[in-house]
Amino acid sequence: MPKTTAKRGRGRGRGRGRGRGRGRGGRKKTTKRKPKKVVVKKKKKRKKGKKKDPNAPKRAQSAYFLYMGSVRDQVRAAYPEYKIGDVTKHIGAMWRQLDARKREPFEKEARKLKAQYHRDREEYLRNKHDPRKPKRPQSAYFLFMGSVRARVKAANPHFTIGEIAKEIGRMWRETSPRNKLPFEKKAAKLKAQYWEAKAQYEAELAEEED
């Protein structure tokens, strides 16, 4: 009988101890947190401005910029430690302290340059928008592009304009000299016609000015 009691005690102790230990020391239920969505801000693409015509007349410099050009090297030599911004500030202070008599030569030159700029601009705009002015001829490559663009678009409807241009460029590079020849001949003919028309157009303008 004593042996049986001991066994029972052991059983009860083990059962209770295990149950209690598991209940008290059991792991807590953890809820997994969803990772926060990282919002990547897309950079706004800057609109490309119109390309400046290299033949367009440049704006005339102001009196201050003419003065700046005349003293910049002098200021740099006197203050070698100056940065570009420091040089500009120093010249600005010098200009503000300059009396009217010393400013006059720069203002006179600026007025002269401004008048010349307006004359050049009027002539440039007149020639630019003149419907009689002959248009520049297309190159051999652009003639080839015009002949295959529709075909490339139809074969690749998902292509963007840039991708179409790249594909045509690849095709042109892989075109044999023999197949390029018709486009090159046509381009040479158009170029000769352009120079002839341009010479005639400039002669007509000279007559009108006289």
Image (cartoon, grey):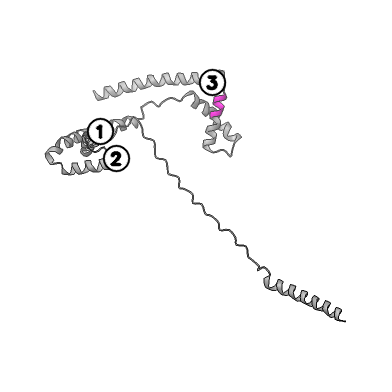
> Which amino acid does the dot numbered 1 rest on?
Tyr
Q: Quadrant of residue 101?
A: top left
Which residue is located at x 80 percent, y 76 percent?
10
Label 3 packing within 10 angstroms: few (<14), some (14-19), many (20+) = some
Q: Quadrant of residue 55?
A: top left
Q: Which mark is residue 84?
A: 2
Indicate the amino acid at tag 3. Lys
The 10 Å Cα crowd at callout 2, few under 14, some 14 to 19, many 20 or more, is few
Percent across and percent down for residue 121 are 28, 33
Measured from the top left, where is residue 113 in percent x and y? 22, 33
- Residue tagged 1: 117
User: Which structural element holds mark 3?
Assistant: helix
Q: Nearer the viewer, residue 189 or 177?
A: 177
Q: Main secondary structure of the magenta part?
A: helix
What range is drawn magenta here? 169-174
150 relative to 99, above or below:
above
Residue contact between numbered discs 1 and 2, judged by CB atoms under 8 Å: no
The amino acid on which the numbered mark 2 sits, given as a three-letter code, is Ile
Residue 162 lies in the magenta-colored region: no
Q: Secondary structure at mark 1?
A: helix
In three-dimensional space, the C-alpha distance between marks 1 and 2, rounded to whole angstroms, equals: 28 Å
Find residue 180 and name its label: 3
Quarter of the image for the C terminus: give it: top left
**Going 71% across and 72% down the picture, which residue do you hit?**
21
- Name the element at disc 2: helix
Q: Is residue 171 magenta?
A: yes
